[in-house]
Amino acid sequence: MTIKATGLAKAIALAATVTASLTGAASAEITLRGASMFDEQHAYTKTLRAFEKQLSENYDGELEFEMHLNGELGDESDFVTFLQQGVAIDYAVMAPANMAVFAPSIPLMDMPFLFRDLDHWNAVLSSDVLKPLEDELYEKADIKVIGYAGGGTRNLVSDGEISNMDELAGHKMRVMGAPIQAKIFSALGAAPSAIAYNEVYNAIQTGVIGGFENEAASIQNLKFYEVAPNVTLTKHTITVRPVVMSGKTFRKLPEDLQQAVLDAGAAAGAYGRELESREDGEKLQQMVDAGQITVTEFEGRDAMLDLVVPVQDAYAEELGATELLSAIRAK
């Protein structure tokens, strides 16, 4: 994976200036480093702050936290590399698709049309159904899932109105990097392509793509409504955003701190799910009220659901995850 030069330089500098070693349990102070693509107001950042607060309360030793905001260390593909290598970043909230390079099965948890509704989504994330994916990520990427945040409902966001299957046909749109994302939207007749997230705004502005898909918080936070003011309520994904820690960092921690990390991660994830699912509708309405977006219902959404089931089944079979997909559907 290519790492941006600026991000790598900062990672090297940060790794060289860590104020406390994680290799000794007797260290008076342990410094843990977090990163977010967003500012303090975003649900992902608030989730990480909740993790820090809960961890401080759970652990008797001295902890210091460093947080790098607004993509200071690059985008999430950079975060994954840093986490995997154990440099610059110790914990973050991640989109599963961005970890697919190391763990090909992990995007299953974020597959479009996987969850029936918020109750189904929360039931899955509150259980151990996804443990096989967690184990694969830890084994292949050395990244440990310590909780589950998310809760944003992803919809189509475009420069022109899309309200039905005919208007979706041939629509050039950005999707996340995991192959299942492109397969799903190809099956629906769109023309998906995986481009870097930080290039989306310009790509829409210059006509390279006509839109993308995302949840309300990101549309608002990064002002995508300026180039793509049309939101179509496909409601194709309720996001799953694992709260993760570098495996290399986790194993260096004292055993009592490891347990405190797991407990704090689970608590922060639950906090993040409640927060983001609640804020999602509020942020969408805020943009409507401000005249920044036009919201359109998608006609014939049931037809979309019928078209994607064979794609989901084939993808799960390819991954050897047919039983896992059945377990998720049955939850």
Image (spheres, rainbow, N blue to C red):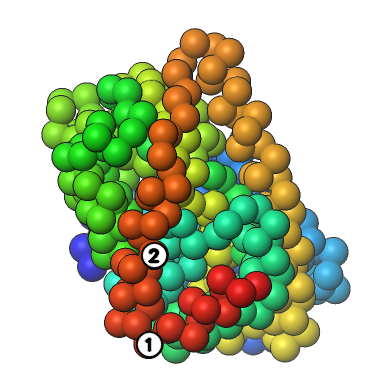
In this view of the protein, which residue sits in the foreground, 297 or 32? 297
Looking at marks 1 and 2 on the same chain, the residue that comes earlier in the sequence is marked by 2
Position above or below: 41 against 103? above
Q: Quadrant of the N terminus?
A: bottom left
At horizontal 64% and vertical 86% (from top left) the residue drawn is 24
Q: Is residue 212 left or right of residue 321?
A: left
Q: Amino acid at mark 1?
A: Gly
At horizontal 77% and vertical 84% (from top left) the residue drawn is 256
Q: Quadrant of the C terminus?
A: bottom right
| Quarter occupied by residue 12 | bottom left
| Mark 2 element type | helix
Position of residue 112 measured from the top left corner of the image (x, y, whole percent): 42, 57
Determine which residue is flagged by label 2. Answer: 309
At horizontal 57% and vertical 79% (from top left) the residue drawn is 327
**Residue 100 visible:** no
In this view of the protein, which residue sits in the foreground, 195 or 314? 314
Packing grade of label 2 (10 A; few <14, some 14-19, many >=20) is some
Position above or below: 158 against 140? above
| Mark 1 element type | loop
Q: CA distance from mark 1 to mark 2?
A: 16 Å
Nearer the viewer's eye, disc 1 or disc 2? 2
Determine which residue is flagged by label 1. Answer: 320
